[in-house]
Amino acid sequence: MKLKLKVWRQKSANDKGYFEEHMVTANEHMSFLEMIDVLNEELISQKKDPVAFEHDCREGICGTCNMVINGRPHGPSKGTTVCQLHMRVFNDGDTIVIEPWRAKSFPIIKDLVVDRSAFDRIIQAGGYISVNTGQAPDGNAIPIEQAVAADAFDSAACIGCGACVAACPNASAMLFTSAKVNHLNSLPQGKTEATIRVQKMVAQMDLEGFGNCSNTGACEVECPKEISIANIAAMNRDYFSSMVGSEESV
Amino acid sequence: MVLENKVPQGKLADKWTSYKSSMPLVAPNNKRRLEVIVVGTGLAGAAAAASLGELGYQVKCFTFHDSPRRAHSIAAQGGINAAKNYQNDGDSVHRLFYDTIKGGDYRSREANVHRLAEVSRDIIDQCVAQGVPFAREYGGLLANRSFGGVQVSRTFYAKGQTGQQLLIGAYSALSRQISLGTVKMYNRHEMLDVVKIDGKARGIIARNLLTGELERHAAHCVVLCTGGYGNVYYLSTNAMTCNVSAGWRAVRRGALMANPCYTQIHPTCIPVSGEYQSKLTLMSESLRNDGRVWVPKNLDDAKAIREGSKTALDIPEEDRDYYLERRYPAFGNLVPRDVASRAAKVACDDGFGVNPTGLAVYLDFAAAIERYGRSAANTKGMDPDKTSKETIIQMGEAVVENKYGNLFQMYEKITGENPYKMPMKIFPAVHYTMGGLWVDYNLETNVPGLFCCGEANFSDHGANRLGASALMQGLADGYFVLPYTVGTFLADEIRTPAFNPNAPEFKEVENDVSNRLNTLMNIKGNQSVESFHRRLGKIVWENCGMSRNEEGLKKGIETIKALREEFYKDVFVPGSADEFNPELEKAARVADFMELGEIMMHDALDRKESCGGHFREEYATEEGEAKRDDGNYTYVSAWSWSDDGNHQLHKEELQFDNVELKTRSYK
């Protein structure tokens, strides 16, 4: 299949970006990133600068890859990261527009590579249970209802890719932050710090300059791990009740 | 060189406990003054950095990823072993120890493996306390499943993404220490060399990948947790950036590479589909709990399937060869990985392969779907014999979806085929490397002050790793071993002041690194780094892959040398060294892989026996099983590198005082 790519090129955060057009020959069994590999090999053979993009595990779990394809984070397939997107969903002769995540809190580093360290800082603010190595009681000491564990798992399935931010018209990080908060707050082990956790993580999220949530639901639609927007509601509940009862201010 | 393994005296089961209670300690006031560098943030690295930070050391932690959470431990699917015996099926520390020794084909160190089995139980407790959402039974207690090479159920799991959940646990512990200021995190920094002062490891040279700037970082000791080297084969289940460079640079500064030829070929991966392919995807071993592996009995059927005139569904039951069940009735589809992989290779070599390339076998869930369907019907009070087949299958598919849904989904995304209806096609692929830096019982290399944990060291899996044991080892090393054993080195360093990164030793090594990068930049040839990596992978796969022989290995060594020469004459790296340049990063890694590949072949050549993942065609039983030579090869081979090709082999003899060396049988 022959494709026309319009790829975002930008030398650095301070340079002006632009779309560059390339023709690529691909086949339907390739993954999207393997198609980009073909483009880059071609550019390198012409002694040109290859398109910078991030990727690693190529099996949809590390959360490194990030491209907006034809206006949609991670492209058209539901519940799929770019690395798991296969060319069979495109047609011969298609034009494909490829852009980076666009959000103030994710500054562009080069081409399609952005800086997502804001997510790390949100976790550092409270996305943990304060237990040192060696302090744990027996794993079966606290039974956890199967459904509770399963819900916590569903929130914890977030891979931290940032598609929710890229999808949101406000560049809000509510889906990411709420998934992280709920994963821990819903488990008995995480309850002790639930109040302080939600306050600190929300405060950090705001500090990073992410936008507010206006319930458009785009984040849930584009999330490659299909994290539910119900997480946001649950976090709001935790957050508001924490403002009523908490004695500690952050 | 004498390799002192420093295994403590005493009875096997008491060694670790008594060693722990008598080893030198560092007082809290001194810990604050001691600096430790941890390179890598996978399970071993993140766990080590977090635990060292909790203890009070000043930790600097490095990853080349944009976030510590992206390390490749995240991709582990199936589970983590622990000798909890929650299932009351006769498991124990000794049994886990024994299974691991046997699974490793009697080529690992008894004391290390026993310690691993001991601390395995603490790992589960720790992870649960961190909020790892393991699968649970209806009663709220932890669930288990079975993995290959064992006859108990000791694998803990979180659907098909156990690695991600455990890594998020370790990453959250690390994040907590970062916020407390005990760990300083350096994202997007790649370690490019080790700095030694007076023979001890005292720092690293790291490249800031965003700016290209070389940085000197000093510490009292250095811990490498930098993963395995499976990408030497180019195609593997490893992530694209997995590499050997940190470990290899350590080898070039005097550390030893142990058992490099022991590589694990995982039996259940999605087969290669074309030349453009960049990586292979694993289908978790847990699938072999329920999937049955088979090929057609008749060559004609196999040929018809390859040509597309028949499918798996056209082959009647009596014409299918469930070859693992036939050859290994005791373990059936759950034989260890090396055994299952070789059996698949034999089936395909004999012409029974079932995809157009002839390199695939079936992994079939039809029987499991029916079995689960009948059981589900029974639970609902329906008589399975009177329920329609469609209903049974529907109910069975729901159970299978619940167990393996995300794996089935992944398979369908990649291949475009529905594995509920059509058996999966699978083939072995490079997955894990048992070899790694030689370390003693303290996980310290032969370079004082240089430690190595996780897949990057060689220590626990012998010649073959059992499924769900990599996560166990990474976390054991990081949480429960290294934080103690590092004290054996640092206790003598409490009077050593912080090291000055402007010392001549640092400048000298930085110079070496800078020259190395400039060499790569200045070749300005015509071939891409990727093209060299692909060619290297092919050479290593063909000559040092699932089976090896003397002729192939000798040829491989010569071919790699020639490729290396060509690389240094004709590789093209775009851009410059002082900017964000992923091609340069890749070039440096491929250059190191080319040297490692050569050492792997020397090691495979030296080991004139077959054991675990190392199968020498010349040393096989009449039935085609691996034939060990305990009289001559019960040793760890540890290699040093020499630019003139005169690589030296050092040996650590393995002693087995507690298990009897037997021919490994899963029949």
Image (cartoon, rainbow, N blue to C red):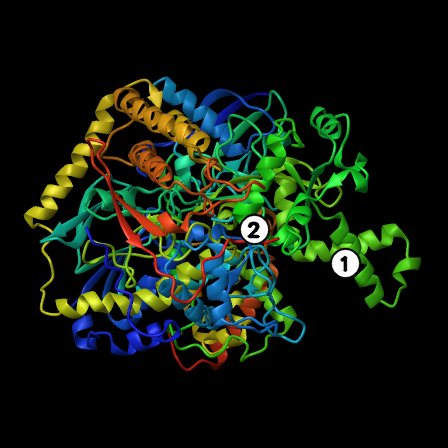
Identify the residue shown where x is 37% and y is 28%: B556
**Which quadrant of the structure image shows residue B645?**
top left
Specify whether B645 is left or right of A122: left
Mark 1 sits on what residue? B372
For the residue carrying disc 2, how many other residues have a C-alpha within 10 Å: few (<14), some (14-19), or many (20+)?
A: many
Looking at the figure, which quarter contains the N terminus of chain A?
top right
**Which amino acid does the dot numbered 2 rest on?**
Cys
Percent position of residue B361, x then y? 65, 38
Percent position of residue B207, x then y? 24, 43
Nearer the observer, B126 or A92? B126
Q: Is residue A163 above or below residue B32?
A: above
Percent position of residue B641, x then y? 23, 39
Specify whether B589 is left or right of B467: left
Say the numbered circle drawn on residue A219: 2
Identify the residue shown where x is 36% and y is 28%: B554
**Which quadrant of the structure image shows residue B143?**
bottom right
| SS type, badge 2 | helix
Q: Residue furthest right?
A: B386
